[in-house]
Image: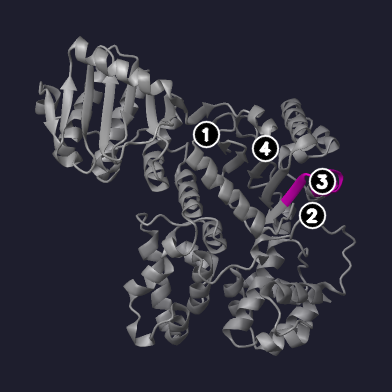
Amino acid sequence: MFSKKLDMLMREMGANNAKVAACAGFDRTNVSRFRNGVRLPEPTSRSIQKLVDGLYIYACDYDRIGRLCDITGASRDGEINDIKLALLKWLYEDEHSGRKPIRLKGRPSASKQKQSGNTFGTRLTDAMSLADISNISLSRMLSVDASLISRYRTGLCMPRPDSGSVDRIGNILFKRIRKNERMRELAGLMKCSEDSITETGFIDWLFDFDTQAPAEEIAVARLLEIFEAYDPDKVQVYGDEPDLRAEIINDDSSHYMGIDGLRTAVIRFLTMAEGSECRELMLYSDQDMGWMTEDENYRNSWAYMMARCIKKGIRIKIIHNIDRDLDEMNMAIRSWLPLYMSGMIEPYYNDMPRDGRFFHTLFICPGVAAVEALGATGAEDSSIYHYYTDDDSIGACIATYDRLMDNADPLVRTGSPDIRPLLNGDVSVIRNTLSIGTMPKELVDEYSDERLKEIWSDRNSALLEILKDHKFYEYAALADPDELDAGKAFTEKYERGLCKNYTRAQYERHLDNIIRLTDEYKGYYFGILPDVMLKDMTIIIGEGFVEIIYDKLPDFAIGFTHPLMIRAFGAFADRLRRLCRIRP
């Protein structure tokens, strides 16, 4: 019996509820209910995945791994995943729930994927074990959702170096490890002497992203954190109102010097645009983005003035460069994201490579003003930035811009989600719940919602069309049985953010239909994530495009077509397949 076996195993290993719960990342009352038989978790539930992980981590931390293997029949020399699988089978070998087990292509959980000891996720997990701290406890100290810590540990998300999380996480873990007198074990992980470890050195080791993962994976992980931090419900005004001193507003200078001069010129430019009858701005710059992003106060002022222009109904065309690196693009997206959500931005990318010798900046408000600079790369802070207000100079700038547009393609598409590109190749979709398109028809009918039926019909038809010639990979975390019993498990959100509650029986029928799809269509793959990876977001990765949909705005999507982004998200999709052990 599950409860008796768990109780015996914990007694044999000298474990108590609190320590196993801390290793597992949930409350100790969960372990208590498992041991006394009040609750029997499903073998595929997130609760049992966490319990198995917690028992394994405890056994490693307290030198009980040999005893764990002897009791469960696992090989002491076995791989981590093999030991965990043996533990899971041993716990359930006498249980007969009567339910059909989930059999999906690939392994059942990304959490069972063995990670290299040199990844951020593995280092964080090891440090948290030494600190004897759970996902929940760490998340409370950081005032973030516990699922974010889970994604950090699986390597599917990484904190931005400038977010403040880096120092806070490092400080908390270092102090706890030292308090627990486990510095010797930390020295073994860091491959240095115990006496040489400092808090700064520990933080540098823990967050040394550059040596831990490919740049593309790191860039996508950081980009997703930017998107997740954005809340459509809370955005009203972008940035802070700049100090529009009289000398800026009334300035009639024809040129400005250096980066500070450029910043002044741009604020003047946006102020004139917002006060004019202009209906379009035309922006291009291939110089380093630091002039806009490095000074937070200036970035906020710039965002405020851009938002003022958009609010007045001015559309903004901007041409990005194909050869900006991922860090530059992430910085730009971080600044531009709230503006993209307005639907008033038309971003493009130019496929002509940047000239490494020169930079060119060109901002135009037709009929009002233009800012232009052409200088040697690296000399931006000593270059002259011209400010034109005469028709001839502005016309010449427009002609130059039009030539750049001849070699440009759309970078970001904003508007209603578009399923047509999905039909052109293999697709990967990451969600926080099961998809409407994979529901059985009888379940859709049971909800008696005509709009839901229409959406299901469109998405189910698109899915089946893709599967005729291509592969479809879908990733989601399964609902916890407790959430199902409490009526807190929901369908995917659809029109205007509406969703339906699942009963346990309804959820099981949806899972059964997913199993049917995996059996019936050789191109359909479902990967179970260990936890909700993307809060309030869905990501669609296809051939030549990426689309991000906020659940709160299901009728609005942001789509990327820039080759660098496509390549980075393609690497991210490959990583998900490896984590879920999907082998097409």
Name the quadrant of the N terminus.
Answer: bottom right
What residue is disc 1 on? 561
Q: In which quarter of the view is residue 400 placed?
A: top left
Q: Residue at x 44, y 87 (%)?
A: 184
- Tag in front: 2 or 4: 2
Q: Residues under labels 4 and 1: Cα distance?
A: 30 Å
State yes or no: discs 2 and 3 in contact (Cβ < 8 Å).
no
**Image spot of residue 245 (x, y percent):** 12, 30
Range of residues picked out in magenta: 511-526
Up/down of 227 relative to 86, above or below: above
Magenta highlight: main SS: helix
What residue is disc 3 on? 522
| Residue 501 left/right relative to 380 | right
What residue is disc 2 on? 104
Q: Residue at x 75, y 76 (%)?
A: 87
Name which residue type carries label 1.
Thr
State yes or no: discs 4 and 3 in contact (Cβ < 8 Å).
no
Q: Secondary structure at mark 4?
A: loop
Name which residue type carries label 4.
Cys
Which is more N-terminal, label 1 or label 4?
Answer: 4
Q: Secondary structure at mark 2?
A: loop
**Image spot of residue 543 (x, y percent):** 62, 37
- Tag in front: 4 or 3: 3
Which is more N-terminal, label 3 or label 2?
Answer: 2
Name which residue type carries label 2.
Leu
